[in-house]
Image: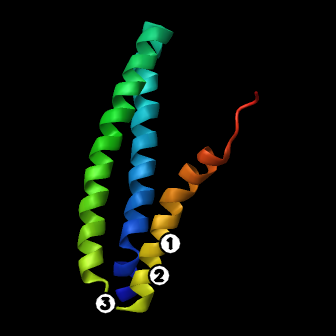
């Protein structure tokens, strides 16, 4: 049970990503008949609102997990979660556009 509690942030992150992708697919299916320009705006609104809500939920959960981290394995799982979150950002910063 302790390992599951320590892995809670990364599990919640996976669930939030799956939920946001599912909501985006539903929004795209619903607005698909209205045309590309309407569909693009609807998907953008769904993504932005979903990211704000997911960020708030995830920040609250990570803050609570940091206060409860009492073992080295808990801290290592929090570090692994941080690496999972920062790796796409690092990859996008490494890209160099062609001159």
Upstream in the sequence, badge 3 or badge 1?
Answer: 3
> Which label is found at residue 76?
2
Residue extending farthest right: 99
CB atoms of marks 1 and 2 within 8 Å = yes
Distance, label 1 to label 2, CA atoms, is 6 Å
Residue 93 position, x and y percent, is 60, 46
The quarter of the picture where residue 34 lies is: top left
Residue 80: numbered disc: 1
Q: In the rendered view, would you say 70 is above or below 97?
A: below
Q: Which of marks 3 and 2 is nearer the N terminus?
A: 3
Which residue position holds label 3? 70
Which class describes the residues within 10 Å of circle 3: few (<14), some (14-19), or many (20+)? Answer: few
> Can residue 37 be seen from the camera position used here?
yes
State the image coordinates of residue 40 (x, y, percent, origin top left). Answer: 45, 18
Name the quarter where the C terminus is drawn.
Answer: top right
Mark 1 element type: helix
Q: Is mark 2 on a helix, strand or loop?
A: helix
* Image: 40 above or below 78: above
* Residue visible at 44% across and 87% down in the picture: 73
């Amino acid at each position: 049970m302790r390992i599951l509690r320590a892995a809670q942030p990364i599990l919640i992150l996976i669930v939030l990503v799956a939920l946001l992708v599912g909501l985006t697919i539903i929004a795209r299916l619903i607005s698909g008949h209205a045309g590309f320009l309407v569909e693009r705006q609807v998907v953008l609104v769904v993504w932005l609102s979903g990211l704000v809500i997911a960020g708030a939920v995830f920040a609250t959960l990570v803050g609570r997990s940091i206060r409860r981290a009492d073992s080295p394995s808990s801290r290592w799982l929090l570090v692994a979660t941080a690496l999972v979150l920062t790796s796409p950002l690092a990859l996008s910063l490494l890209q160099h556009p062609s001159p």
